[in-house]
């Protein structure tokens, strides 16, 4: 049951540059921070 994991490991994962959290939403490619850090900086 590791095939899915292997598959995802091969994908380039975007990580938050602030906390290292993996960013799941890839639709907005300009975002380099997770939602938490992003809202912290822009509220
Ligand atoms: Zn973050």
Image (tube, rainbow, N blue to C red):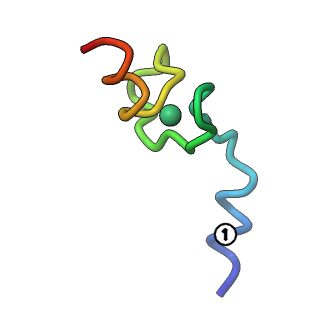
Question: For mark 1, does the 10 Å Cα neighbourhood hold few (<14), some (14 to 19), or many (20 or more) residues?
Answer: few
The residue shown at (56%, 43%) is 21
Please state the horizontal and vertical placement of residue 39, each as a whole percent of the image: 31, 23
Q: Is residue 9 above or below residue 27?
A: below
Front position in the image: 3 or 41: 41
The residue that label 1 is drawn on is 5
Residue 35: x and y, percent?
A: 36, 33
- The reply, left or right, for residue 14 in relation to residue 25 is right
The outermost residue toward the left is 43
Residue 13: image quadrant is top right
Report the side of 42 relative to 1 (left or right). left
In-image side of 41 versus 12 (left or right): left
Q: Quadrant of the C terminus?
A: top left
36 over 4 or under it: above or below: above
Q: Is mark 1 within 8 Å of ligand 1?
A: no
Residue 9: name its quadrant.
bottom right
| Above/below status of 22 relative to 9 | above
Residue at 62% x, 71% y: name it: 4
Q: Which residue sits at x=69%, y=76%?
A: 3
Helix, strand or loop under label 1: helix
Residue 23 coordinates in the image, percent (x, y): 50, 39
Q: Quadrant of the N terminus?
A: bottom right
Relative height, residue 39 to residue 13 (above, below):
above
Q: Say how many tags the image has.
A: 1
């Amino acid at each position: 049951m590791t095939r899915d994991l292997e598959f995802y490991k091969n994908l380039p994962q975007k990580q938050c540059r602030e906390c290292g959290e993996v960013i799941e939403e890839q639709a907005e490619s300009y975002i380099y921070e997770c939602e938490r850090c992003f809202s912290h900086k822009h509220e």
